[in-house]
Amino acid sequence: MKVFIVFAHPDKRSLQHSLLQVTVDTLVANGHEVKVSDLYRMKWKSELDRDDFPELPKESRLRPLHASIESYKDNAYSKDILNEREKVLWADMVIFHFPLWWYSVPAIMKGWFDRVLVAPFATPTQNDGSPGLLVGKKAQLIITAAATEENFSPSGFLDDIALSLYPIQTRMFKFMGLIASDPIVGFNAEPETTDCFDKTSKQIIDFVASSNKG
């Protein structure tokens, strides 16, 4: 299986980086091909702007969806967008690897979503229930969260973590046609004394093993 990992964390010594290495090593050990986009290391530009559409006339307004549709005909996007789309098309599975910040992805990854996955590359141009354009590919979230699992439960003060992940795990993946597995979440990630690394590593290893069977 070909696996593309989109990764976001600014610190190479972070728990997320350590877990990324577990993910890559486990996938490779099981015979999978892996490509990684480390967004901070790449200095990924998170803002969608006119530079994304090199052939957009200077006198034209920037209407992102319209500009994307027009640019799609000749693949007239900036090189960094084209490079990332090649990886998406290459992959059988896309893994999004990130810490949960403000109940969502880091801004740099949100910018990757905005610039790479804009219609008509990954989604239909009309909101009419048409199937997404990445049908058949798989998607997986691997997340760390500073709070405990109890606090991110339905009875916890932060509420069920599924509510935080719903826009991505359900709405976004479904809109693109991606087949999503249950998210892997490492809770209580902030204190270095916790066993978050061991528990999350086991989830990753088990996930890869189950993917091999599938």
Image: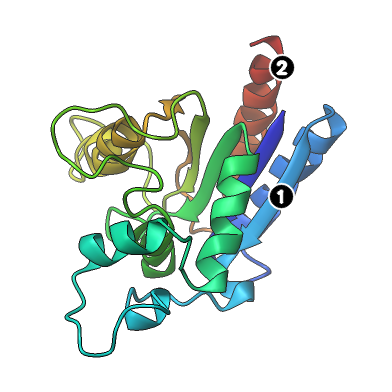
Where is residue 171 shown, x and y percent of the image?
25, 35
Q: Classify residue 143 as left or right of residue 23.
A: left
Q: Secondary structure at mark 1?
A: strand
Instruction: Give percent across and percent down for residue 127.
Output: 14, 38
Residue lying at 51% horizontally and 58% vertically, measured from the top left: 191
Q: Residue at x 36, y 68 (%)?
A: 107
What's under tag 1, amino acid-wise?
Lys
**Residue 212 got which mark?**
2
| Element type at mark 2 | helix
Farthest residue, direction top: 213
Quadrant holding the C terminus: top right
Please name whichever residue, 149 or 214, is drawn nearer the observer in this view of the structure: 214
Q: Quadrant of the N terminus?
A: top right
**Mark seen at residue 63:** none
Residues packed near mark 1 inside 10 Å, few (<14), some (14 to 19) or many (20 plus):
some
Q: Residue at x 39, y 78 (%)?
A: 55
Q: Residues within 10 Å of mark 2 (few under 14, many from 20)?
A: few
Whole-Å distance between the Cαs marked 2 and 1? 18 Å
Name the outermost residue toward the bottom.
58
Q: Is residue 163 above or below residue 84?
A: above
Visible in this render: residue 151? no
Image mark for residue 35: 1
Residue 100, picture quadrant: bottom left
First in sequence: mark 2 vs mark 1 = 1
Q: Position of residue 213 (x, y in %)?
A: 69, 10
